[in-house]
Amino acid sequence: MKRSVLSMMALLAVLGLTACQQAEEKAPQAAQKQQAEQPLKVEVAKVSLGTVPLTIVVPGAVVPDEQAQIASRLMGFVHNLKVKEGDHVKKGQLLFTIDPTDVKSQISQAEAAYRQAKAALDDARADYERFKKLYEEESVSKQQFDKIRLQYQVAQQNLAAAKAAFDQARAQLKYANVKAPFDGVVVKKLAANGDLAAPGKPLLVLENLETMSVKTEVASDLYARLHAGDEATMWIEGIDHPVKGEIYALVSAADPRTRTHTVKISLPKALKNVNSGTFARVSFKVGERQTMMIPAQAVMVRAGITGVFVVDADNRVHFRMIRPGKRMGDRVEVLAGLDLGERIVVSPNNRLLRNGDRVEVVKVVDPAQPADKGA
């Protein structure tokens, strides 16, 4: 009998402990359920109209604004040509020299002619002074004096011509040392040491990489819409972001073969690591069109589907698939999936939402204003 009482007491203790545990487990579940039923505070924005620019994109290439084909003014053999393609050179740096043997020979000949003309002038001056005195004493006729005076004038002119030729020959000597006309890069090397240089024959090609631009060819209808100073957007190979520039050159004459016009757009001087010949795509704005726009912050991807949370009249949210278009800063074009005036969630916590959740709208964001940076 005593053993039965003890067993009964033990059973009651176990049942009491189990009831307490179940009560403790149901308490947080009830709290969670109550918390889940609380509406989530959100910010919303209305689907509104916005403008998207109409653009035309054409191919182009980076070109230098300053390019020089380095040639010699003298005929002679090339010496000291040490630069190679890709080398950076400074303004005034010696690029190569031309064998000055022929120039020095010309200088010697011109100097000899100058000395002869000077000696002839001295002799003619002496004759002129002697005959002038005799003419004043009426010892010679006027005809004889005029002849000596003419010889003296001719000697003066011969000396001036000889001096000019001598100065020109000496000036040619400085062209034997060919120097860089500006800071730049050697992009082509067309000669080697020992080659015979001729006047006007390029030996090197230099480009100034500090002043670059993008050159493109456009059709006549697009050319008619462009003006100097208009802004253009460029995507350049090797640059991971679009680059803005201004149109500074419009060539009115069309290419007779392609019927296109040349347009040049400036590049920012701060842009680095851009080489001539690099491919570029140039976008010109030619107008605008109206379309539905929403804040980019509202767009999200769930299960591979791009969409937004739409708030209905009962303040419940529903995830709706959309077809986005162009992105303009902090706003996205909507091509399909929404109607004007619908409310969409733009709060940072929209990723916590589920279909059918009740929300409390605490703020209506102006869609024309950029999204908060904290998003």
Image (tube, grey):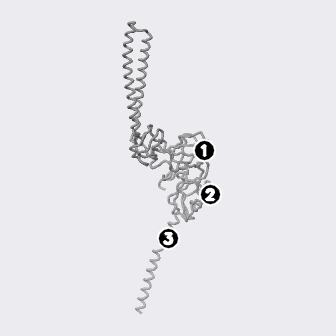
Gap in angstroms between the C-alphas marked 1 and 2:
38 Å
Amino acid bearing label 2: Ala
10 Å neighbourhood of mark 2: few (<14), some, or many (≥20)? few
Location of residue 3 in the rendering, given as x and y in whole percent from the top left corner: 41, 91
Q: Which picture quadrant has residue 338?
A: bottom right
Mark number displayed over residue 336 = 2
Amino acid bearing label 3: Ala
Location of residue 345 in the rendering, given as x and y in whole percent from the top left corner: 55, 58
Amino acid bearing label 1: Thr
Which tag is nearer the camera, tag 3 or tag 2?
A: 2
Q: Residue furthest top?
A: 138
Depth check: 303 or 240 in front?
Answer: 240
Depth check: 158 or 262 in front?
Answer: 158
Depth check: 234 or 253 in front?
Answer: 253
Q: Earlier in the sequence, mark 1 or mark 3?
A: 3
Mark number displayed over residue 30 = 3
User: Which residue is depicted at the point 38% across and 21% down?
Assistant: 120
Query: Tag 1's secondary structure?
Result: loop
Query: Tag 3's secondary structure?
Result: helix
10 Å neighbourhood of mark 3: few (<14), some, or many (≥20)? few
Q: Which residue is mark 1?
A: 260
Which tag is nearer the camera, tag 1 or tag 3?
A: 1
Please give left or right for residue 147 compared with residue 264 in the image.
left
